[in-house]
């Protein structure tokens, strides 16, 4: 970050990760940016859930963003607000079939957030060969602020997940 943008020298930031993570958990709409095979960016709003240090969202493998990820796993995730900002960069890929506790947790979180909008997937929605396409995004770094420029903060994550 350039000088004057709130990140003190030698400190990763002034916003606690717990506050950023709470914003990720509570968000309803997320913006996902992927890269088309010809290098052009593609941006789309998604519904999803943040759990286990990752963003989980589903949809048809035939969508543009899913096709983009087959060519380039790079993805950027941004919450809706331009005032309370959370931007994460990382990689995304189809998840392994979801079963057991993680499937129940993700299903329950989707229902809490989106059932009143008409979407309430069951825990087995992502467990079989014909199941909907669950994608998991794992961040490598994040940038966040809630009072620009005073609390601009950056975070780095272990690249192994």
Image: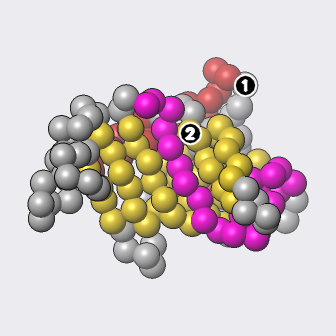
**Residue 7 placement (x, y as % from top left):** 19, 52
Mark 1 Cα shell of 10 Å, populated few (<14), some (14-19), many (≥20): few
Q: Residue at x 42, y 59 (%)?
A: 53
Q: Which residue is mark 2?
A: 30
In this view of the protein, can residue 41 be seen by the observer? Answer: yes
Whether residues under marks 2 and 1 lie with C-beta atoms below 8 angstroms apart, the answer is: no
Image-quadrant location for residue 28: top right
Q: Residue at x 57, y 33 (%)?
A: 29
Q: Residue at x 87, y 54 (%)?
A: 62
- The answer for how far apart the CA atoms under marks 2 and 1 are is 17 Å
Q: Which is nearer the eye, 61 or 34?
A: 34
Q: Which is nearer the eye, 119 or 94?
A: 94
- Count numbered badges in the picture: 2
Q: Which residue is mark 1?
A: 118
Q: Where's the N terminus, which quadrant?
A: bottom left
Q: Residue at x 59, y 41 (%)?
A: 31
Residue segment shown in magenta:
60-82
**Residue 46 placement (x, y as % from top left):** 65, 40
* Mark 2 or 1, closer to the camera: 2
Residue at the far bottom: name it: 160
**Is residue 79 shown in magenta?**
yes
Image-quadrant location for residue 95: bottom right
Above or below for 96 versus 53:
below
In this view of the protein, can residue 99 be seen by the observer? Answer: no
Q: Where's the C terminus, which quadrant?
A: bottom left
Above or below for 66 versus 158:
above
Q: Is residue 130 left or right of residue 26?
A: right
């Amino acid at each position: 970050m350039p000088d004057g943008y709130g990140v003190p020298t030698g400190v990763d930031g002034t916003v606690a990760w717990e506050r950023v993570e709470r914003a990720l958990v509570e968000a309803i709409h997320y913006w996902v940016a992927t890269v088309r095979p010809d290098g052009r960016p593609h941006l789309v709003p998604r519904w999803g859930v943040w759990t286990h240090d990752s963003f989980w969202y589903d949809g048809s493998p035939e969508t543009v963003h899913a096709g983009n990820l087959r060519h380039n796993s790079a993805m950027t995730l941004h919450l809706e607000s331009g005032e309370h900002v959370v931007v994460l960069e990382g990689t995304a890929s189809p998840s392994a079939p979801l079963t057991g506790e993680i499937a129940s947790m993700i299903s329950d979180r989707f229902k809490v957030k989106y059932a009143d909008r008409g979407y309430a997937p069951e825990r087995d929605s992502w467990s079989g060969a014909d199941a909907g396409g669950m994608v998991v995004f794992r961040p490598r770094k994040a940038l966040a602020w809630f009072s620009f420029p005073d609390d601009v903060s950056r975070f780095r994550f272990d690249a192994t997940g």
